[in-house]
Amino acid sequence: MKRLLVALIFVMLPAPAYAQDIQSGLAALERGDYAAALREWRPLAEQGDATAQFNLGTMYHLGRGVSRDYAKAVRWYRLAAQQGFAAAQYNLGGMYDKGFGLPQDYAEAVKWYRLAAVQGDAKAQYNLGSMYEDGQGVSHDYDKAVKWYRFAVEKGEPRAQINLGRLFAIGYGVPQDFIRAHMWFDLAAALGLKRAVESRDMVVRLMTSAQIAEAQRMARDWLKQHRNQPVTNFHFGS
């Protein structure tokens, strides 16, 4: 399964001593003044502020205000990740996953995805589920793949909805259930994912009209129960 590599976003998590400087850096970023953002964040990062370290890592990752340098991005992500910063843990996992700035290492990717996932990071939960499904860095384990996909879909992660739907369609890690497969494909399709539409169209061929209607009802009910749930957490992907 193709995994999203990293979440690339600059964040501001207020800390009493550093909140103003972090926000000043974000304001500079919004103006397109990357050099000013860098001036605000680098001293904080060097002093150990995890938010600044993550943001500095993102600048090196994207090449904003500095030359793109995956190795330096990894360095700053790691410093923030070691302090428990979930977004940095997720991004560091992605760097190991793809071998950007360091040797590819699926086991290390799993380690960092897991740390972010247990903190509730939906994209990390999706990627961890995918690692279990693909058997990369861990043994193939469809039960654990389903577990992590379920956590991710509760946050509205559409790719996890597709993968969970597929596992229901083929009966891996869960009993085969075309109705639930259709439901998850329907939810992801509603967000415009072409792959979900294609998967739903395939499973429809194996269903009765009554089963399709039930799946659509379940999807509507799920949306009602989760109407205030954001589609994802504070990250966005590339």
Image: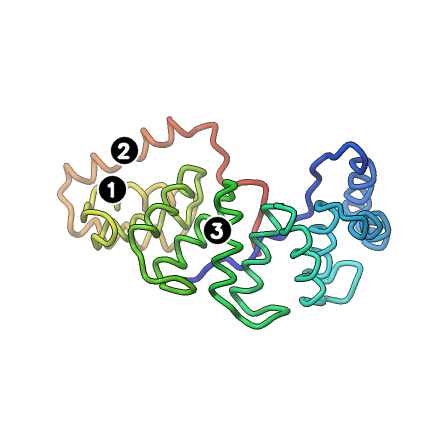
Left or right: 129 as drawn, with respect to 206: right
Q: Is residue 58 above or below residue 28?
A: below
User: Mark 2 is on which residue type?
Assistant: Met
What residue is shown with label 3?
114
The CA distance from mark 3 to mark 2 is 30 Å
Using a 10 Å C-alpha cutoff, classify the residue at mark 2 as few (fewer than 14 neighbours), some (14 to 19) or many (20 or more). Answer: some
Left or right: 46 as drawn, with respect to 182: right
Picture coordinates of residue 148, whole percent (x, y): 39, 47
Picture coordinates of residue 211, whole percent (x, y): 16, 39
Residue at point 83% right, 51% down? 33
Say which of marks 1 and 3 sits in front.
Answer: 3
Instruction: Classify mark 1: helix, strand or loop.
Output: helix
- First-in-chain label (2 vs 1): 1
For the N terminus, the quadrant is bottom left
For the C terminus, the quadrant is bottom right
Where residue 140 sits, quadrant-wise, is: bottom left
Picture coordinates of residue 234, whole percent (x, y): 59, 41
Residue at point 50% right, 53% down? 113
The CA distance from mark 1 to mark 3 is 26 Å
- First-in-chain label (3 vs 2): 3
For the residue pair 47 and 42, the one nearer the viewer reads as 47
Left or right: 52 as drawn, with respect to 224: right
**CB within 8 Å, label 2 to label 1:** yes
Instruction: Classify mark 3: helix, strand or loop.
Output: helix
Using a 10 Å C-alpha cutoff, classify the residue at mark 3 as few (fewer than 14 neighbours), some (14 to 19) or many (20 or more). Answer: many
What residue is shown with label 2?
218
User: Mark 1 is on which residue type?
Assistant: Arg
Residue at point 37% right, 57% down? 132
What residue is shown with label 1?
180
Residue 54: assigned label: none
